[in-house]
Image (cartoon, grey):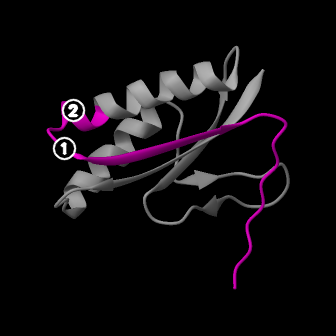
Amino acid sequence: MSYLVVVTFDIKEGDPDDYNVVYEGLEKIGLKTKLKPDQGEAVTLPTTTTAGKIDGTSAAAVRDDISTKAKAVFIENNLKGEIFVSVGGDWAWGQRTV
């Protein structure tokens, strides 16, 4: 089953280069800063937010796997901060500009 995974993060005392390496690391595990809808053009997610469609056996299993991998991105780059992982099944998403 596929799940929509949304990860937001904050880096303690992070500079722009730190954020870039986290974005790159998260993209390697399937989480991007832009999402393409079924129809239309890709949308850019708000700052420090990544998302992606991830296959797995359960929402909890996907959450645990992505949490571990996201944490590893921080550790590999000697960064500290907060990571929030949300996983949803039977999902839909939309974007609005205000």
Occupied quadrant, residue 16: bottom left
Crowding at mark 2 (Cα within 10 Å: few <14, some 14-19, many 20+):
few
Identify residue type, mark 1: Leu
Disc 2 + disc 1, Cβ < 8 Å? yes
Query: Which quarter of the rendered picture does the N terminus lie within?
Result: top right
Q: Which residue does the numbered mark 2 point to in the structure image?
A: 75
Q: Give the structural element (helix, strand or loop) at label 1.
A: loop
Q: Tell which of 25 and 14 is nearer to you.
A: 14
Indicate whether 67 appears above or below 98. above
In magenta, the rendered stretch is: 73-98
In the depicted view, which residue is nearer to us: 74 or 40? 74
What is the crowding at mark 1: few (fewer than 14 residues within 10 Å), some, or many (at least 20)? some
Secondary element under disc 2, as helix, strand or loop, is: helix
What amino acid type is highlighted by mark number 2? Ile
User: What residue do we see at 75% from left, 26% from top?
Assistant: 2
The magenta stretch spans residue 81:
yes
Image-quadrant location for residue 13? bottom left
Residue at 40% of width from left, 25% of height from top?
A: 68
What is the x, y in percent for residue 45? 57, 61
Left or right of 19 on screen, residue 66 = right
Left or right: 14 in relation to 36 = left
Tell me where residue 28 sits by quadrant.
top left
Q: Nearer the viewer, residue 20 or 55?
A: 55
Measured from the top left, where is residue 71 in percent x and y?
33, 32
Q: Residue at x 83, y 48 (%)?
A: 38
49 inside magenta stretch = no
Residue 74 left/right relative to 60: left
Question: Is 63 displayed left or right of 93 in the figure?
Answer: left
Instruction: From the image, tell me which residue sits under label 1.
Output: 79
Q: Which mark is residue 88?
A: none
